[in-house]
Amino acid sequence: MAVILVLYTYRKWWLWLHALFFVGSTIITLITSIPILLTTGIVYPDSNFPTSHNRQTLYNHYVLGITCMVLMTIATGAGFFARIAYMASISPKLFLILKWSHRVGGYIVLILCKTNYYLMLKPDQLPLFISLDASMVSIYLIRRLFFPKMESKQISAKYN
């Protein structure tokens, strides 16, 4: 949702919704992940941790989850500081570095989080989630390819 929202940045409140969504996701991720890590630690494949999942799968889930948590925090911070750099007219080079770090980091986090989610799905749940993700990717690609500039006169004279 955050990616789709940011496509409409010519409407300033959509940019704020994007920021709110990403910051909210980061806070929820930290609030839920850190207590789990503090309680269980990382479940290694050779441990005696009681689980209904394969221990190697659970280990991969933990490692990928920690990576997602760190990258999500970095991408959120880069977006926040890019906005500050833009408003404060700080070095354009610094702004571009922060902006691209946020953008690339956001896409990497999206892919890694989806991968991590799929690791823990049961086989009978896969078709539903694959179809949901395929439809979201299709909507995104159609929007980017066929409507790259959904703004200006097509929406309202107010935004000319």
Image: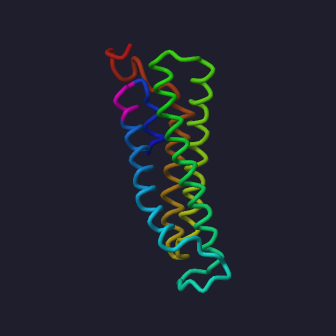
Count of numbered tags = 0
Where in the figure is residue 108, as x and y percent of width and height?
61, 47
Q: Quadrant of residue 101?
A: top right
Quarter of the rendering containing residue 13: top left
Q: Which residues are magenta?
A: 11-16
Q: Quick check: 58 left or right of 21?
A: right
Q: Is residue 73 left or right of residue 63?
A: left
Q: Locate residue 115: give its quadrant.
A: bottom right
Where residue 48 appears, x then y in whole percent? 60, 86
At horizontal 41% and vertical 37% (from top left) the residue drawn is: 19
Depicted 141 relative to depicted 111: above or below: above
Residue at 62%, 28% in the rendered image: 97
Query: Residue 116's spot in the image, x, y percent?
Result: 57, 62
Residue depicted at x 56% and y 80%: 53
Q: Quadrant of the N terminus?
A: top left
Q: Nearer the viewer, residue 151 or 82?
A: 82
Position above or below: 64 against 140: below
Q: Main secondary structure of the magenta part?
A: helix
In screen coordinates, is 79 left or right of 11? right
Q: For this rendering, which residue is in front, 40 or 106?
A: 40
In the image, farthest residue toward the front: 38
Q: How is the image coloured?
A: rainbow
Magenta segment: does it hold 158?
A: no
Q: Position of residue 4 (x, y in %)?
A: 46, 40
Image position of 45 with respect to 77: above or below: below
Q: Is residue 98 above or below residue 139?
A: above
Magenta stretch contains residue 12: yes
The C terminus, quarter of image: top left
Seen from the viewer's position, the closer of residues 102 and 1 is: 102
